[in-house]
Image (tube, grey):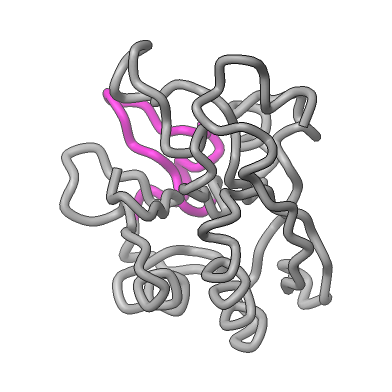
Amino acid sequence: MPKSWRAGCPVGPDRLAVLRLSYWDFDGRPRVGTLIAHRDVAAGLVTVFETLYRERFPIRRLDPVDAFDGSDDASMAADNTSAFNCRRAVAAGAPTWSEHAYGRAIDVNPVENPYLFDRRVLPPAGSDYVDRANRRPGMAVPGGILVTAFAKAGWSWGGEGRSHPDYQHFSTSGK
């Protein structure tokens, strides 16, 4: 984790787990990817991904943010699903750590599930997915397999009940 972790992060590398998870890509092929998350939530994430795999929910890519030099923007632009990244929260300003910095949040298929913040769509390629009524593969939707699988594991979805919906975001804290 030389790019996504550094001294001063709120969680040490000894508290993180490296998970190898099976998933289906958008071409219907089985894949194995890597997710880094807090070790306390690792078992729950394995259960979520087992459900997603069984239901053939597509994931574009599953690589640690280190594959993108620790850049959240680059990871989102690549439609990469990721969890741990020692970074500040986008909406809260510089003084607040993101839940990703604790390894207790995950962003799933960021292009299909954009973050709508301050009249911006993040990542910009997610503009085609702002209309949530136009349901397509890989999208997080109320009652859908992705949202349901995370809810059963005790995670909250950022796509409902917020003035700035973050459709890609799931966390254990609701933040």
Q: Is residue 123 left or right of residue 158?
A: right
Identify the residue at the far front of this view.
14
Q: Does residue 124 show up magenta in the picture?
A: yes
User: Is 119 drawn above or below residue 158 in the view shown?
Assistant: above
Q: Is residue 64 above or below residue 134?
A: above
Residue for point 57% across, 83% down: 51
Residue 107 percent location from the top left of the image: 52, 48
Left or right, 85 with respect to 17, comes to: left
Q: Quadrant of the N terminus?
A: top right
Rendered location of residue 36, percent (x, y) = 67, 48
Q: Is residue 167 magenta?
A: no
Quadrant (top left, top right, bottom left, bottom right) of the C terminus: top left
Residue 119 position in % (x across, y down)? 29, 25
What stretch of residues is rendered in magenta? Answer: 112-131
x, y percentage for residue 123?
52, 34
Q: Tell me: residue 143, above or below residue 147.
A: below
On screen, residue 10 above or below 29: above
